[in-house]
Image (cartoon, rainbow, N blue to C red):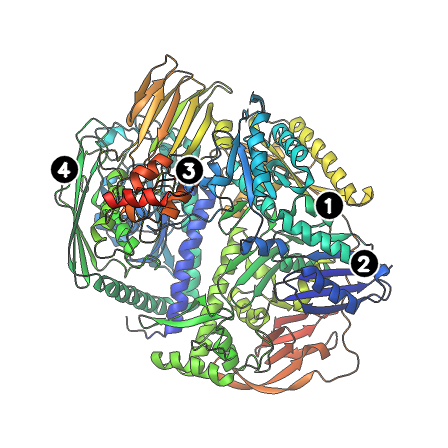
Amino acid sequence: MGYRIAVDIGGTFTDFVLADTDSRTTTTGKVLTTPGNAAQGVMTGLQQMVSDPSSVDFFVHGTTVGLNAFLERKGARVLLIMTAGVRDAYSIARGDRKTLYQVQYRKPERLVPRRDVLEVRERLRYDGSVLEPLHEEDFEPIIQKICAEGIQSVAICFIHAYVNPAHELRAREILNAALGKDVSVTLSHEVSREWREYERASSAVMNAYIAPIVERYLSSLEQELANFGTDAPVHVMQSSGGVIRAKTAREIPVQTLLSGPVGGAIGGVALSKATGRPNLLCVDMGGTSFDMSLIIDGKPGVSNETEQQGLPLLLPLVEIHTIGAGGGSLGWLEAGALRVGPQSAGAVPGPACYGRGGTQPTVTDANLFLGRIGTDARLGGWMQLDYDAAEKAIHSVASQLNLSDVDLAEGMLSIINAKMADAIRTITIQVGIDPRDISMVAFGGAGSMHAVWLARELGIKEVIAPWSPGTFSAWGMLQTDIRRDLTSNFFHRAVDTTPEMISEIFDRLVTEGQALIREEEVPDEDIYFAMSADIRYIGQEYVVTIPINRPFDIATIDADFHAAYKVRYGHSTPGAPLEFVNLRLTAFGRLESEVMGFQPRTDGANPVKGTRDVYFDGVKMSTTILDRDAMPIDTYYEGPLVVDESSATTVVPQGYSVHVDPLGNLIITRKD
Amino acid sequence: MSTKIDPVTTEIIRNAFISIAQDMNATLIRSAYSPIIYEGKDCSVALLDNHGNVLGQSLGLPLFLGNLQVCVQLTAELYGWDYFRPGDVFYMNDSYMTGTHLNDATVFAPIYWKEQLVGFSASRAHWLDVGGKDAGGPMDSSDIYQEGMRWPPTRIYENNKPREDIIEVLRRNGRFGFLLVGDMNAQVAAGRTGETRYRGILDRFGYDTVMAARDEIFRQSEVLEREAVSAIPDGVYQAEGFVDNDGLGSPPIPVKMKVTVAGEQMTIDLTGSSPQTRGPVNCGFAQTISAARVAFKLLVNPLRPVDGGTFKTLTIEAPEGSIFRAQEPAACQWYFTPLGLLIDLFVTALAPAMPDKAASAHYGDSMVIFIGGVDPRNKLPFLAVEPTPGGWGGYKNGDGQDALINNVNGAFKDLPVEVYESKFPVMLKNYGIRADSGGPGEFRGGCGLYREYSVEADAYTSLWFDRSVTPAWGLFGGKSGVGPDVALYTPDGKEAHILKVNAKPIPNGTVIRTHTGGGGGYGDPFKRDPARVRADVLDGYVTVQGAKEQYGVVIKDDMSVDEATTAKLRAKE
């Protein structure tokens, strides 16, 4: 027994959660992120929190090192090698437009310019048979170029390699033999075993682009941890919502690309488990964006592909939906009408109340003006907020509309809340869920400030402001299992498919999946699997992924597909012919995951910090301000009230009450 | 409407209308069967008020902008506004009413709230096949009866129940009946999404408030549009181009446009354009209005959502009996070819007034290839239909994009080689960017592409490639892009070049190589920064020879710019 530690490396702060399995206590910590080498910040925090490094049993972290390299376009120069004749598939990028009313349209900026996309001769047919063998001599000029130009990373994507990877595998042997291990080689079929050469090439390129950077970072972290005296293996969060060991993360680092952004949903999964609420809507409202994710039956929604800055990535990803709405959203006028967002004041100048030169009112200014947050709220870098600047900005717009300042400020909040509620309607409708049946979990700097109003608009009965929202993601990571995803292309009409055909594929995938989880040093009794199939009506493009189970039965699968389709789209066509596209296996390795709550202060400190005038529905009300850290477990409070803590403010209007549950979460419900 | 309304409520309702239309569109696209809908975005949805005015519209295919309300209004003209009943859903496709070809299915339904007609949900989507003499629609039709069945507004649901007899007629008259009914269901579902959300708004705010907000929203849109049109210098702007032919061997078909800007008003006059043709390049006036609105929207407030206050500054004129206002029995199957041209011409006409917002012409048309037959692998019939991307025009401070889908084709994605070869008995061994095809300019036109189909079955092909008579032209001294070309190589060693053909039999072993054109250049190519010309050569968009001949830039063997010779060459011109 000892410590289990989770670390969430964000853009500004690195957050820690440490669970002591002996004393059964959980503590949190926070240090500034060290941008040059994120491992330094991690070590600083560990040194503060851990007295006996050898007692660390488990270490997991989420990192944005790869994502930052991608977003800032500071990855490695990548050479992409494709099948002769079709290398331009990468540069053409499928030729589609993502916005339609634009004569000056530009495609998303790809990571590899056309001059760095090279060809070798080889060709497979659709069934994996060899039409033209690999011309090994074609690599000679490529190897010379790599050496001469000091290229660090190569991606290879051959046509139909998802069926037969032999040529890609041989290509790596050739490059490794000539170049040694210093040049990173990414094979498209190892990143994704799916068809569509542009998407697979793009995925391989993204991996190659961040591989050297993630490798350097992980090596540095492992070295530092070893020096510190910790021999627990380093685990890394994946975009899919599962963890893997660093050793595995190095092989396909792009799997960890979005380990930071998916953290909120991971916290939601853990909260779902801890509080016995199977369905949750997680909302994260920060300065510029509003992120939503759904937990259904205790599991996050996971899609099998995504786009990042317009570039496709064929990897499982916890679904996060984002709209441009946040504390920085600007109120502005157009044709005598009031608009709020999507433009944001950003970090500079930021809201008027930051005192950095902003003069237009933002959502944060409205909250400050109405008293929903205090001037001592620690926003945007710990400064004192400037109430007068907020008031001036609000007034400048209100006067042009002949509205009172209070009406304008509340109006801005109503508009932004309605936009967020509409976005929630959209994502819940898309999966066939009624928002009235779920609880909302709100976090992020402004999440629990707005949550009650969103819930009211959507008919949601319960809002949860989780304990320590700043470390919510890290807390979730502590309770996450090992996960590996495997896919096999399986393009068959349902009428031509037998259970034996499906069984044969899954037998292979299970063997592979079991081997992968064993590599993570998980004992066999803790290995478990989930099987699913991508199916569609013949003629369709989008697939619906449905779970399937042994013994496989085509009629059952058929019925399950129609049912799932109907839930998702409101109609289905029983009797219409189906086809399979992919079979998927997710292999899990169960980790210790006992949920431990936090330790509230028991010194009997008074949670009431004082009162403040706060406007609700145009009425000024004297409102209790509570200090969250001093609110004991299992206590109840009645709105109106405001709960302050270091990283968030929770606003509870009259008519609502708050319960501090045994885990320290605030459960907000409507009275009556 | 006398109800007073505050700006906050108006804005909440405005955002809700936009969100409703987006949700309707998401429902339609995610559950549609035909790629032409879910990727081609050959669809459009709208929430309309009880007189057919647009409350919210989602931007699907540009060409369907603003002609859903016409369908509702024409139905009311025929039968009266009291003709609608709760639980109705209507279908119609008549080209002379809806404006487009018969494949485009308009589905709309009245929405009731507290037993009062409060509006309509409406959608339009392209159904892959609606009968007619050739699968997917003929390329050589000479009257509309060869293209399928004309449906006036017809109830497909009554009392919320499908009229199975009517739906069965539809299903039996399409070659892919399941797909057709699936797409119809997706449209009905999209309508239901709109209905549910709209009633939610009415429940929350009440009818009078919602209508007051509507009036205010329309007013705002109109004000913004008047401001934008006023900012365009007054004047008469003109442009002219040609459709190659009507698919039945006609001479080039002229399209003439005169745009008059006077204060807050703009008129697009198509007088002088060709009379309706025997071949299928005609459309109803409703569709011309839509296309003109798309063109307008490209340059005037492109990011603002469309509603009932939009387009009040715009008047469109086209002579009766012209290709833009065709009369029965004109063939309409390939109605969009003149419309893509119309959009390019509008941008060109206004370029002198709006040089920063314009762009040179793009490669121009959908460049469609059909390959069909029986797949020897499973003995089942197959039909592969796809448009092909090409080059777009250069613009102030930016090169046109290479290999991008055409302006009337939504968000169509090419079919991946791996998917194409798995689905069809055809290999795509060569697919790439066509060097030197982009129009030279200070800002280069984008390059077209080539795509090579090796057909491994006895099959047939239909081709519709256009814009060879007036390939993408340049602006402000920029040069034209190279036009399209299609080469057929049959196993007997013969080579043929054909741009348009209907259901031509091709033997097993035939290779078809399509080439799409490049976009027009913008500005004098000799003013292009030699470093950018060099970069294009390194990337292979321009050859060394092209750099010299088109740009006057000499690239040496070590790939550096020969500054002295370049200066000399450029001075000569």
> Which residue is disc 4 drawn over?
B275
Across and down, in percent, residue A259 comes to 64, 54
Name the image quarter holding the N terminus of chain A.
bottom right
Q: Is residue B374 above or below residue A142?
A: above
Q: Is there a contact, CB below 8 Å, between mark 1 and mark 4?
A: no
Report how far apart the C-alphas of labels 1 and 4 lie in the structure.
Answer: 68 Å
- Which of the two residues, B90 or A242, is positioned nearer the viewer here? A242
Q: How far is mark 4 from mark 2, CA to CA?
A: 84 Å
- Residue identified by numbered label 1: A588
User: Compared with residue A587, is residue B431 higher up or lower down, i.e. above or below?
Assistant: above
Q: Foreground mark, 2 or 1?
A: 2
Residue at 53%, 71% in the rendered image: A453
Q: CA distance from mark 2 to mark 1?
A: 31 Å
Chain where mark 4 sits: B
Mark 2 and mark 1 lie on one chain; the one further toward the N terminus is 2
Identify the amino acid type marked 3. Gly
Instruction: Mark 2 vs mark 3: tell me if same chain.
Output: no
Three-letter amino acid code at the position of disc 4: Pro
Q: Which mark is residue A227?
A: 2
Residue B74 location (% of width, % of height)? 24, 48
Q: What separation in Å lies between label 2 and label 3 (alpha carbons)?
A: 51 Å
**For numbered disc 4, what is the local secondary structure?**
loop
Dot 1: chain letter: A
